[in-house]
Image (spheres, grey):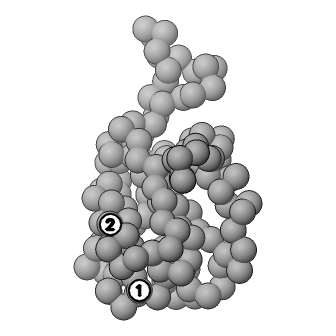
Amino acid sequence: MRMILSLPKLFAAAFPVCQAYKPEWITDEQIKSITHLPIWLVHAKNDNIVPFEWSESAYNRLIEANAKNAQCTWYDNIADLSGLWLDEKGNPWEYDGHWAWIPVFNNDAHAVIEGKEISLFDWLSKQKL
């Protein structure tokens, strides 16, 4: 988040994972400075390191400021989706909620945009400066 707030014109898109800026650390002017930038926020609601509300607030503020392309993926928890890692009951292994990077880098973060489901990486590939 610091990179896009400091250099809002440098990137074609951004995907903050577990966005770690408190709402009061981001001014309304800073939010306006990134409304042109495609941004996809990812966070787990049970993150015990960075409060989910910080990402939720950033997303809501972007929407309220008429961001052109703000997306989000909110997870209740972070569970293994590969089928390789199971708990003792045979359920998908549940990781710490702060590990939202796992579904991101496994391309399991999705959103519905214009009525079609798209993965974060497919969305990223469509962004241009």
Q: Residue at x 65, y 41 (%)?
A: 106
Indicate the secondary structure of the residue bearing disc 1: helix
**Label 2, residues with CA under 10 Å away: few <14, some 14-19, many ≥20:** some
Q: Is residue 103 visible?
A: yes
Residue 100: percent from the left, percent from the top? Answer: 49, 47
Residue 45: percent from the left, percent from the top? Answer: 33, 45
Q: Is residue 21 visible?
A: no
Q: Residue at x 50, y 20 (%)?
A: 92
Q: Which residue is mark 2?
A: 60
Position of 26 compared to 10: left or right? Answer: left
Q: Is residue 117 above or below residue 37?
A: above
Q: Is residue 14 above or below residue 75?
A: below
Q: Is residue 74 above or below residue 63?
A: above
Distance (Cα) linking label 1 and label 2: 12 Å
Q: What's the amino acid at mark 2?
A: Asn
Q: Quadrant of residue 107?
A: top right
Q: Residue at x 32, y 86 (%)?
A: 28
Q: Which residue is mark 1?
A: 32
Work out which quarter of the rendered image holds the C terminus and state it: bottom right
Q: Quadrant of residue 25?
A: bottom left
How many numbered discs? 2
